[in-house]
Amino acid sequence: MANRFSVAILALTISVPAFSSHGRRDVTRLRRANRVFSAVVQTSRRGIPGPILKAARCVAVVPGERAFALGFGGAFGKGVATCRRGPDWGAPLFVRLSGGSWGFHLATQSGDLIVIFRRRAALTSSLAFGLTLGALGAAAGPIGPNASAASAAWRRAKILTYRRRRGVFAGARLGGYTLRPDKSSNRAMYGDRSWGHILAGELPAPASAYPLLGTLGRYSAGASK
């Protein structure tokens, strides 16, 4: 009995630091996502048009996405996605991004990705079924304050995609990318709740997400429904 108790205590002391380390990485991801999104929206002349943010239902931010190539071009990254109910943005879901296309690339590059969803169903379809953003109707998003360009963009696409690389922010064609739930990070932050419950806003957001949700709220204010 004593031996079993000792083993249990040892397992607990090992698992706690591991969980804490995982939690710190997730908090860092939320902070990085906020920095990326803040930097983009504060650039009014070369940022995401206000009407697009006001009409957005969900937003995904993947800071530091990496492109790689060894004869096969692709990308991977970790980020967060959040949807809103009315004017408020819900608890962020941790997501993984992956994608690829055939072709020869000479160097590894990195960048930040922002994906704007006009309907939540477009995001949940990618998360649930692994559908690519292109299959769901993604297009490169416009930049700048031009409201007519923003309206035209939403008429032709359900998803608008952007990339920031080496300080340059622009709409980008990211049709081959897929977003899936990051199960380990969501479990560490929310326990055993499903990604659907998280994305639906049924759980309170962690305090570490407040800066990101606050930034989203400020720049998407005035949206309907």
Image (spheres, rainbow, N blue to C red):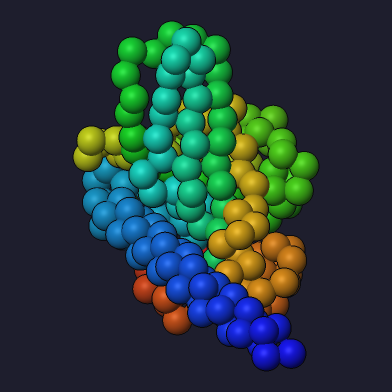
The picture places residue 63, in percent across and down from the top left corner, at 39, 49
Question: Visible in this render: residue 211?
Answer: yes
* Front residue of this view, candidates 65 and 19: 19
Left or right of 15? Residue 200 is right
Residue 201, can we see it?
no
In front of the other: 168 or 14 = 14
Where residue 95 sits in the image (x, y, percent)?
Answer: 57, 53
Give the residue drawn at x 63%, y 30%: 134
Q: Quadrant of the C terminus?
A: bottom right
The quarter holding residue 84 reads bottom right
Q: Image point 51% across, 73% down: which residue?
A: 14
As drawn, the residue found furthest toward the bottom would be 2
Looking at the rendered image, the quarter that the N terminus falls into is bottom right
Q: Answer with left or right where residue 218 lies relative to residue 1.
A: left
Left/right of residue 135 with respect to residue 118 in the rendered view: right
Residue placed most toward the observer, 105 or 115: 105
Residue 178, above or below 223: above
Along the viewing direction, whichever of 152 and 200 lies nearer the viewer: 200
- Answer left or right for 2 relative to 98: right
Q: Position of residue 119 (x, y in %)?
A: 67, 52
At a point 66% along the width and 33% down the height, the residue shown is 132
Image: 116 above or below 67: below
- Total marks shown come to 0
Residue 170, position as x, y percentages in the image = 34, 35
Q: Residue at the spot x=56%, y=62% of the render? A: 185
